[in-house]
Amino acid sequence: MSVQEGVRPEVDAATVSRAEICIAACADAWRGDGEILASPMLTVPTIAARTARATFEPDLLLSDGESRLYTGTWAIGETPPADRIEGYVPFRRIFDILWSGKRHVMMSPSQVDRFGNANISALGEFAKPTRQLLGVRGAPGNTVNHPTSYWVPRHSARVFVERVDMVAGVGYDRAAAVGGDVARDLDIRRVVTNLAVLDFGGPDHTARLVSVHPGVTVDEVVGATGFALDVPADVPESRLPTAEELRIIREVVDPRGLRDKEVRA
Amino acid sequence: MTDKRMTEDEVVAELRSGMTIGIGGWGSRRKPMSLVRALCRSDLQDLTIVSYGGPDVGLLLAAGKVEHLVYGFVSLDSIPLEPHFRAARESGAVTVSEWDEGMLQWGLYAAASRLSFLPLRSGLGSDVPAVNPDLKTVTSPYADGTEYLAVPALNLDAALVHLNRADASGNGQYLGPDAYFDDLFCGAAERAYVSCERIVPTAELTAAAPVQSLLVRRSDVRGVVEAPKGAHFTTCEPDYGRDEAFQREYAQAAADDESWAAFADRYLSGDEAAYQAAVADRTLEAAR
């Protein structure tokens, strides 16, 4: 045998796209979650959740976004075969699961502040918004019931703002003000963007820079963030996907390369 | 068993201006669109609409029927933002109660269970209470003393839902992937009306599908409308999927008054039969 067992094949950093870095960073959001429902929105988080389950987090539950849970790994846009159905999760049961806490969602907000308050509802004055977005949808309930992460495909000072116009997803300062179960269970795990990974490990649960993607400087991230970001003295680079993760991403989940439409660079 | 068969226009004739009307389905999925189109043709006004909203809300807004909206979202699913809803919000043309999706379920369940409210964690800490100042909290009377949002009952004057099959007395059946909240809408309403793809003899309901697919009981239903393609252009699986091409045309037409007038003239100026004929013509044209 020419390759030692247990030694991973090398990944050539030059061949890894920014989207693939983002997918690995999103996948890590679910690391350690075990047997809970992973609910990704948008393309990169969807690829990430399936990649996480196919590699380091095999007990995750994954749905088709409609009403069925499936085993195995399948491509974006594809419906898995019926013999891989393992559960029935119509919307009403999704509410049951989210209220039970056994879920971790990754949403894509239009605004986020330094305490993790997130807006998917509307921009401007709520009574007459300058731009109506989706509405609060499930964000208020998601954030106070189970872990939540965010995916921001375009990191900018328009997204990362001092104050969000409408708090749909609850952040740490708001949760602390409510106290009780809400403060105990609020868990905004991480924010992955096209430039960096943030969490809320700064003073008083404020946003902190965890890592910058290869090729991105700390100054770029700080400049594209509209609030004071906690920047540790030493900020590492975001990790590369493993060879096995890259195989899953490129050959199994996203052979059509939809990830590059969501993250350019 | 009472024969409750009616037409869309007979249903609408039982409704009044100012009523609170709940509409079943979810986004652009299994919406009672033929009943919504009949509402749009009527002279009813100032309605309060409760919905996991899709083009039902859009059409009613475009027809000027809505005074107040209660929703968790209004979306066309494959097109994230409902264009008429967006326009109505951005022009301030409608007042709204924007709730968390789970709150809507709880409000309907409270109404169906004849409770004035149900406690829920969801909504606390968010701006939902701030923009809905009528919402109140309640403290657990038990030792934990936990504070919850007291989601008020969503008592409906009428509910409109669309199912795959029903019998003539109102036993309704869904055959698709999700019941959504249609049974709760019916339970929360003074009068519930079920449209369906086909009215069948009662015995046929369970001949082809499991008993669990019987979603709505006749004791909750006042009228049944046979409405083939009644959910068009939303999904009604397994009978048919969403008419994505038509939905795109709808969304593009909503972009400005002139194109919307042309769309309304082509599709919405006549009765339901005229609508279905215009849609069939369009499909034929597209095939050529």
Image: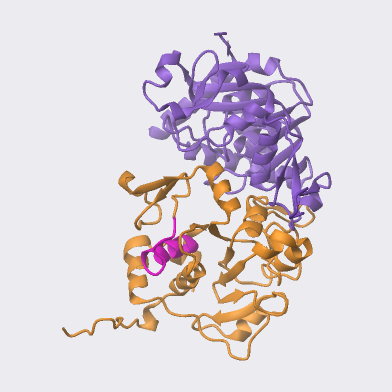
Q: Where is residue A227 shown, x and y percent of the image?
A: 72, 76
Q: Which chain is purple?
A: B
Horizontal side, residue B202 vs residue A119: left or right: left
Q: Where is residue B151 shown, x and y percent of the image?
A: 74, 43
Horizontal side, residue A153 vs residue B283: left or right: right
Horizontal side, residue B201 vs residue B80: left or right: left
Specify the quadrant that holds the N terminus of chain A: bottom left
Residue in view at x 57 percent, y 17 percent:
B224
Q: Where is residue B118 shown, x and y percent of the image?
A: 72, 41
Q: Considering depth in this image, is B84 or B23 the residue closer to the camera? A: B23
Inspect the magenta stretch and tell me whether residue A251 lies in it.
no
* Residue furthest front as drawn: B143
Whether residue B104 is visible to the viewer of this picture, yes or no, is: yes
Q: How many marks?
A: 0
* Residue furthest bottom as drawn: A233
Inspect the magenta stretch and tell me whether residue A48 lies in it.
yes
Classified by dominant secondary structure, the portion drawn in magenta counts as: helix
* B8 up-or-down from B141: above or below: above
- Coloration mode: by chain
Q: Considering depth in this image, is A245 or B263 the residue closer to the camera? A: A245
Q: Where is residue A62 shown, x and y percent of the image?
A: 44, 55
| Residue stretch rendered in magenta on the structure | A44-61
Image quarter of residue B109 = top right
Residue in view at x 69 percent, y 56 percent:
A168
Q: Considering depth in this image, is B209 or B259 the residue closer to the camera? A: B209
* B100 up-or-down from B26: above or below: below
* B74 up-or-down from A208: above or below: above
Q: Considering depth in this image, is A148 or B115 the residue closer to the camera? A: B115
Whether residue A128 is visible to the viewer of this picture, yes or no, is: no
Q: Which chain is orange?
A: A
Residue in view at x 56 percent, y 22 percent:
B217
